[in-house]
Image (cartoon, grey):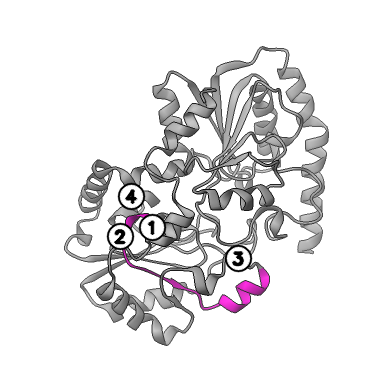
């Protein structure tokens, strides 16, 4: 039954891409392209995703009119989704730029105007688990549309990531560029780090004086049937570690009703405040490696995950921190990794996968959208 529903959904998406959305776009094309107008669009959230905020703010400072077009398709209903997409296509037809950070069907529903630049920020750094056309978990074989045909730039975190992104999105050579990833700029900003800690202590005074352990895993399954693995064992650590530690759980947004500790802080703020990170197959490891603090991966389903999804790198050899698959070892590894961590441990890892992230990524992407070399 689930497969049939999925096939119907894919058919409806394709039908919209081939008929109604191009019609709306062509109607909108009666207006001239406005190079001072950039749209920020997302179909997974009702508000601007964290991956977009730095570029949005930078462009506004440069005098660009930025519009947020965000709608959570999973909760809005078919009629709401249809209305949103039709309105978006009319605006897309006259925009000088479009910025996305996830799969966004309307962006590729028809051939765009040449004067419009489309930038895919994506929502993660490095190259870890397979995505895009590299796995049917992301793009089923039954889907006949495109998720990438209008993209002019994919911003990636290093030269080593360019080929992988071009393969995953089926792009021409040279579209994925090591501009760095906008969301990482704040990790080079000492004022941001200080403000994040002050915010944490002001909003959650119970964390002051304690070591903050952040658990931020990815999800299993697909986007519409997401679930978590291993959360129970993390909660057991709370009593095992004692009162010196504060454990915060930040489940992936796709896991419905997932736990969201310290909700007043966004992910970047939590990362700079955390004394240690536990994750699994999430690309958050690349961002946290920039901060040069202890982390470990809790992966009780590792062998199964490799069989079902797999990775671009050699997961067991290339990851620069401990990988724990046995619950009995989890507590001991947390303690030993925190106590024995040495600064610079991730230097080779970040050099390979994060070398373009230097605090100036947003300016480079903004330059591209403003047609500067």
Q: Which quadrant of the figure has residue 26? A: top right
Nearer-the-camera pick, 348 or 269: 348
Report helix, strand or loop for mark 4: helix
Which residues lie in the magenta part?
289-308
> Alpha carbon of mark 2 to alpha carbon of mark 4: how far?
9 Å
CB under 8 Å between callouts 1 and 3? no
Residue that mark 4 sits on: 269
Choose the circle earlier in sequence order: 2 or 4: 4
Residue 303 among those drawn in magenta: yes
Query: Helix, strand, or loop for circle 3?
Result: loop
Judge whether 60 appears above or below 16 on screen.
above
- Earlier residue among tags 3 and 4: 4
Alpha-carbon distance for marks 1 and 3? 19 Å
Relative height, residue 5 to residue 99 (above, below): below
Residue at screen point 64% across, 24% down? 116
For disc 1, the neighbor class at 10 Å (few under 14, some 14 to 19, many from 20) is many
Q: Nearer the viewer, residue 330 or 165?
A: 165
The image's mark for residue 274 is: 2
Chain-order first, disc 1 or disc 3: 1
Please say if the residues under marks 2 and 1 sit with CB atoms less than 8 Å apart.
Answer: yes
**x%, y% of residue 261?**
36, 59
Q: Which mark is residue 311?
A: 3
Q: Dot 2, how many residues are within 10 Å of its Cα: few (below 14), some (14-19), or many (20+)?
A: many
Whether residues under marks 2 and 4 lie with C-beta atoms below 8 angstroms apart, the answer is: no
x, y percent for residue 42: 58, 39
Residue 88 appears in view: yes
Q: Earlier in the sequence, mark 2 or mark 3?
A: 2
């Amino acid at each position: 039954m689930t497969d049939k529903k999925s096939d119907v959904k894919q058919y409806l998406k394709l039908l919209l891409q081939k008929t109604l959305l191009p019609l709306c776009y062509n109607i909108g094309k009666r207006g001239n392209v406005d190079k001072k107008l950039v749209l920020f669009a997302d179909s997974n959230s009702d508000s601007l995703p964290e991956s977009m905020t730095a570029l949005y703010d930078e462009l506004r400072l440069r005098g660009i009119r930025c519009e947020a077009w965000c709608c959570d398709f999973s909760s809005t209903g078919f009629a709401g989704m249809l209305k949103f997409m039709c309105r978006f296509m009319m605006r897309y037809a006259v925009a000088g730029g479009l910025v996305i950070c996830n799969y966004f069907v309307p962006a590729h529903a028809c051939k765009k105007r040449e004067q419009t630049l489309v930038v895919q920020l994506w929502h993660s750094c490095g190259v870890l688990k397979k995505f895009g056309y590299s796995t049917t978990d992301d793009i089923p074989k039954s889907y006949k549309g495109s998720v990438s045909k209008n993209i002019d730039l994919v911003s990636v975190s290093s030269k080593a990531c360019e080929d992988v992104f071009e393969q995953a999105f089926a792009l021409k050579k040279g579209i994925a560029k090591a501009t760095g990833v906008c969301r990482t700029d704040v990790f080079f900003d000492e004022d941001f780090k200080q403000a994040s800690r002050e915010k944490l202590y002001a909003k959650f005074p119970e964390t002051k004086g304690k070591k903050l352990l952040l658990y931020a895993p990815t999800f299993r399954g697909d986007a519409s049937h997401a679930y978590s693995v291993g959360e129970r064992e993390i909660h057991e650590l709370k009593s095992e570690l004692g009162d010196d530690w504060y454990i915060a759980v930040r489940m992936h947004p796709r896991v419905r009703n997932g736990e969201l500790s310290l909700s007043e802080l966004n992910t970047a703020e939590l990362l700079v405040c955390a004394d240690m990170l536990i994750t699994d197959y999430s690309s958050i490891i690349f961002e946290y490696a920039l901060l040069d603090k202890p982390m470990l991966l809790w992966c009780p389903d590792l062998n199964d995950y490799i069989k079902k999804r797999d990775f671009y790198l050699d997961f067991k050899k290339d990851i620069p921190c401990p990988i724990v698959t046995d619950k009995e070892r989890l507590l001991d590894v947390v303690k030993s990794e925190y106590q024995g961590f040495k600064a610079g441990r991730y230097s080779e890892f970040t050099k390979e996968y994060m070398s373009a992230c230097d605090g100036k990524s947003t300016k480079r992407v903004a330059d591209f959208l403003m047609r500067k070399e």
